[in-house]
Image (cartoon, rainbow, N blue to C red):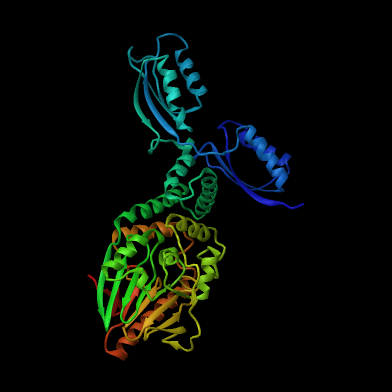
Amino acid sequence: MNRDRYAFVARMPDEPGALHRAAEVLKRHRGNIERIQYDQRIDANTVFFEIGADDETYREAMDELEGMGYLRLALPVPAYLKLDVWLPNVPGSLFDLLEHVTASGSNIAYLDYDETAPRGEPLRLAVVLEDGSRANVLLDGLKARYPLRILEHSSTGEELDRTVFYIRFAQELRPMLEEGEDDFLLEFLNDSNRISQELRRRGEDPVDALRSILDSGKMLRDSVAYGCHDVAPIEVPEGMLHCIQFPCGGNAYLIDAGARLLVDTGFGSYHAALEEALATAGTTTEELDAVLITHADADHCGSAGRLRAPVWMSEAAWRVLQQGDRSYGSGIEGSMLESFYTRMISLFSDFRPPEDFNAVGGGEGEIHGLPVKGRMRFSGLECVALSGLGGHQEGQVFFLFPSLGLLFSGDSLINFASLDDESREYMTLAKVLMTTVNVDSAKAKREREGLLDLAARWQEENGRPLLICPGHGDPSVLEEGSLRSMLR
């Protein structure tokens, strides 16, 4: 029998035996529960299932669960109502009110009633409706029976209680995703729950993890309106270097020195800002001779697919892109956190990776302990690609321009002191949702040491500092063992 793995989100009534009844249906249709996650503290009505079953019996089980009202098929916009209601002074009036509220499908979030209070004092009631479109129906029914005063009427906001936590989470996600249909959101919701479950095993608060997902998406979406934080020109021999810093994520650099080269591109959602930055620097995307990609993270190559210039990167970085997992080729390959983070940030950032590439390769020897991956020339400008060791990410390369005294270090060497508060906040959110920023910490340490050694030896041999252009933060030089910003 061919048994596949299926995931679905259950909409469970908050009553004894509900979960058992759902499990009985799955068992009767020969579905094996392989994962189940339910936390009443987060959402009392939502359960996540993954089961092994053959296709026909799975469909039969889903039909039965749907008929019972146990299947989450849509994500309506919830609502919160807070009211003062004046009840008649007759026996059973509170019971009648509660019966009417319950019949409307509302969940009572707050109730304050004291029969001994002075006459004329209202009952204060707050309810949550999973389907906010029914709020006015409830109000009309109550108005026909009782005098009342509406205190709050909200379809968004933090008042919503845990009975609709995941619905609210999905609704906050919707505007951040191009694919905002309910089927896609339910799938993404299930993946988000898996991540919160994994982070809980690591001692993290699952609600904080889910909030980090939302905050990452909101920061990226809102930051697009800011354009670039900075477009800083720096003189180099026979030309100019322009450092383009975006509000979140990685830098891009324009070299204009005989050839016009772009090193990394930033997120795809920053493409308009990138074009404006290039215009400030006196060029356009059409005038670029080549695009060089240090590694396959979305904040470094997210706009490459929009550019016409040939893209250069390592074959290993290309494989990371094809797999859609930033940990591919490393010791943590297949990590749930890494694969979800890759997918999540790609969705939030309008990821447009290159459709084709030129492979960096054919190099020989090493420079101060870093293997030479390849040597390229662009209009006479020599570029030496140095191979990373698989520390930050498999396939990362560092680009050295000997005649210009420039080294592009990707994410292996960063002047963290030069980061602004927003960049620090975004990087903190990202760390929450990753297994680790570096896929191999020991190799990452060796990469940093190798790059610092290269910078120190370069200065000794050439009598001038090597300008280090990091993936985040300011271009810097090595001074007494530390990185000193050239912009501040």
In this rendering, the answer to whether 45 lies above or below 267 is above
**In screen coordinates, is 324 left or right of 285?**
right
The residue depicted at 48 percent of the width and 70 percent of the height is: 393
Viewer-side residue, 280 vs 475: 280
Furthest residue toward top: 90
Furthest residue toward right: 1
Q: Is residue 163 visible?
A: yes
Q: Is residue 479 visible?
A: no
Q: Quadrant of the C terminus?
A: bottom left
Furthest residue toward bottom: 461
Q: Where's residue 380, x and y in %?
A: 37, 86
In this rendering, the answer to whether 78 lies above or below 37 is above
Q: Where's residue 331, x and y in %?
A: 55, 69
Viewer-side residue, 294 vs 163: 294
Viewer-side residue, 130 vs 346: 346
Furthest residue toward left: 488
Q: Where's residue 204, x and y in %?
A: 46, 52
Viewer-side residue, 70 vs 444: 70
In this rendering, the answer to whether 420 lies above or below 442 is above
Q: Where's residue 33, x and y in %?
A: 66, 46
The residue depicted at 62 percent of the width and 37 percent of the height is: 19
The number of numbered discs placed on residues in the rendered structure image is 0
**Residue 216 in which image quadrant:** bottom left
